[in-house]
Amino acid sequence: MIKFSEIKEGDIVNARFEDSVKIGRVVRADRGEKKLLVAHGDQELWYNLEDVSSIPLSADILKSLGFLPSADPALTGNGQAYIRGPFVVRYPANDSGSMLLSFRDEHRKISSSIGLHQLQNHFQAMTNVSL
């Protein structure tokens, strides 16, 4: 389950209704009711927090967001790196559970797996641009 404090408008999440799970974008968060308004294309629905989950970050997700794999050894260091403009997501080869986020002269080491909404929040904080 996602912590309510981690959710921001624009975050992409999984939303479950009965036996169906759909990917959607958070439109609004009602802090009092602890509900999220999530848009699925033209439709917007309210969800309880327990029905919203994180989308695991993967290479396919990064590519769908416009990140391109890099073969530059200075970036990859025997691991993997994905770039979008000056923003770089690095997965070190010798540290399977961590990643390094870089934007110009700011670097953040993430020591555990994160979800898509968390990457979006880091990206926003580092670049002042929504992902």
Image (tube, grey):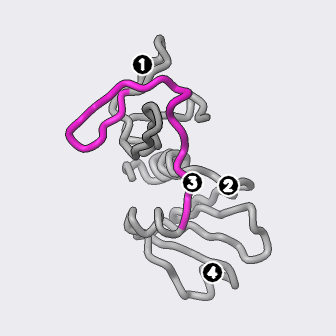
Of residue 122 and residue 14, the one placed in the foreground of this image is 14
Badge nearest the viewer, 1 or 4: 1
Which of the two labelled residues, at mark 2 and mark 1, occupies the earlier sequence position? 1
Q: Distance from label 2 to label 1 (Cα)?
A: 27 Å
Percent from the top left, x then y, of residue 56? 57, 54
Which of the two labelled residues, at mark 4 and mark 3, occupies the earlier sequence position? 3
Pointer 2 with pointer 3, Cβ within 8 A? yes
Badge nearest the viewer, 1 or 3: 3
- Furthest residue toward right: 94
The magenta segment: 37-58
Pointer 1 with pointer 4, Cβ within 8 A? no
- Report the disc number at residue 113: 2
Q: Is residue 93 left or right of residue 24?
A: right
Q: Distance from label 2 to label 3 (Cα)?
A: 8 Å
- SS category of the residue bearing label 3: loop
Q: Tell me which amino acid carries mark 2.
A: Ser
Badge nearest the viewer, 2 or 3: 3
Give the labeled residue for mark 1. Answer: 30
Badge nearest the viewer, 4 or 2: 2
> Is residue 122 visible to us here?
no
Badge nearest the viewer, 4 or 3: 3
The correct choice, above or below, for 129 with respect to 32 in the image is below
- Furthest residue toward front: 19
Q: Residue drawn at (56%, 27%), measured in percent from left and top? A: 50
Give the labeled residue for mark 3. Answer: 56
Report how many numbered discs are placed on residues in the image: 4
Which of the two labelled residues, at mark 2 and mark 3, occupies the earlier sequence position? 3
Q: Is residue 47 left or right of residue 119?
A: left
Q: Distance from label 4 to label 3 (Cα)?
A: 21 Å
Q: Residue drawn at (55%, 46%), measured in percent from left and top? A: 118
Give the labeled residue for mark 4. Answer: 76
Q: Distance from label 4 to label 2 (Cα)?
A: 18 Å
